[in-house]
Image (cartoon, rainbow, N blue to C red):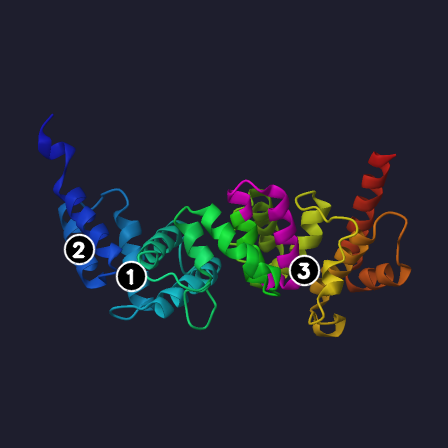
């Protein structure tokens, strides 16, 4: 076979675009993308690389610093869910940003000065879950941030620590389900549960509904006797919570109390907050009790 057919010009030019993206040199990457398209318009992955360049150009300044990269990483999940960014392009954008950042200074637990993007999320994106788990283990011990607990769940799962992952995802959803990164979620069954709820209720309500539905479906487990939520003095009381988030908190308390410890007032409040969801919850409780008998 002719050597030119094995290595077409378009492929070689696209490779140069990828090299430019490693340094987030977007002007150079754009030029190589334009040349690759002129040479071979139907080149595999060309559209994805072009879309990623376009996205990054609109989200990053010239010579981006870690703060700018962190802001772009934080924008990706919302843009995916708003259909402003395709998932395959989002994955590529994540890789470009994470691999650029990982070459820099990694002192401290966060990428940016505002402490919004943990280094552990970058480590997860470049395939280092054990290192990410190590960085988050001490950080979440004193944290009331749902996003950190969610990242810890992803790290634990990928590091083959499923029990830790379950605990972390439950805690993230108890603290603030709307802070959970469901686009990058590594728990396949939990993500499928969220996507089903999102189609029915929208992304915000789906997050509030995720813990009750994940427990009802057997996707997440809640350990009896776990009084973790009650030990967090700064947790808001019910008056500060959205109704479905309040329902999830009450469900957590109900399950940790264990069989034979039903608080009637708590269950009455759950029924008032969401009659249909409460009926599904009670039915799930009954079925599990029957299986234990």
Q: Earlier in the sequence, mark 1 or mark 2?
A: 2
Quadrant in the rendering for residue 62: bottom left
Q: Main secondary structure of the magenta part?
A: helix
Q: Is residue 168 magenta?
A: yes
Mark on residue 174?
A: 3
Q: Earlier in the sequence, mark 2 or mark 3?
A: 2
Q: Is residue 283 above or below residue 145?
A: above
Q: Nearer the viewer, residue 188 or 198?
A: 188
Residue under label 1: 54
Q: Quadrant of the C terminus?
A: top right
How far apart are labels 2 and 3 at the CA level? Answer: 48 Å
Residues shaded magenta: 156-178
Q: Nearer the viewer, residue 58 or 18?
A: 18
Pinpoint residue 193: horizontal percent, then vertical percent: 61, 47
Q: Is residue 245 above or below residue 114?
A: above
Question: Label 3: how many residues lie within 10 Å, few (<14), some (14-19) or many (20+)?
Answer: many
Q: Is residue 204 visible?
A: no
Left or right: 188 with respect to 90?
right
Q: Is residue 214 magenta?
A: no
Instruction: Write the residue at 16% across / 54% down.
Output: 32
Question: Label 2: how many residues lie within 10 Å, few (<14), some (14-19) or many (20+)?
Answer: some
């Amino acid at each position: 076979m002719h050597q030119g057919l094995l290595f077409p010009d378009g492929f070689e030019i696209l490779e140069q675009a990828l090299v430019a993206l490693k340094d987030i040199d977007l002007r150079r990457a754009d030029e190589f993308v334009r040349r690759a398209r002129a040479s071979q318009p139907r080149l595999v992955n060309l559209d994805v690389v072009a879309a990623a360049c376009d996205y990054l150009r609109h989200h990053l300044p010239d010579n981006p610093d870690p703060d700018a990269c962190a802001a772009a990483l934080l924008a990706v999940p919302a843009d995916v869910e708003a259909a402003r960014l395709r998932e395959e392009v989002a994955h590529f954008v994540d890789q470009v940003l994470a691999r650029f950042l990982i070459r820099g200074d990694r002192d401290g637990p966060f990428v940016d000065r505002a402490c919004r993007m943990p280094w552990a999320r970058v480590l997860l994106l470049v395939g280092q879950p054990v290192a990410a788990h190590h960085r988050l283990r001490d950080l979440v011990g004193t944290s009331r941030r749902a996003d950190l607990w969610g990242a810890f769940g992803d790290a634990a799962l990928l590091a083959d620590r499923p029990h830790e992952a379950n605990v972390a995802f439950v805690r993230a959803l108890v603290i603030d389900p709307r802070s959970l990164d469901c686009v990058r979620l590594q728990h396949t069954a939990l993500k499928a549960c969220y996507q089903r709820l999102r189609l029915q209720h929208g992304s915000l309500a789906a997050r509030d509904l995720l813990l009750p539905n994940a427990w009802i479906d057997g996707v997440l487990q809640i350990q009896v006797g776990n009084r973790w939520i009650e030990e967090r003095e700064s947790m808001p009381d019910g008056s500060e919570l959205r109704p479905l988030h309040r329902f999830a908190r009450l469900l957590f308390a109900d399950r940790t109390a264990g069989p034979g410890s039903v608080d009637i007032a708590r269950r009455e409040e759950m029924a008032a907050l969401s009659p249909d969801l409460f009926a599904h919850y009670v039915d799930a409780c009954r079925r599990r009790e029957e299986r234990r008998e």
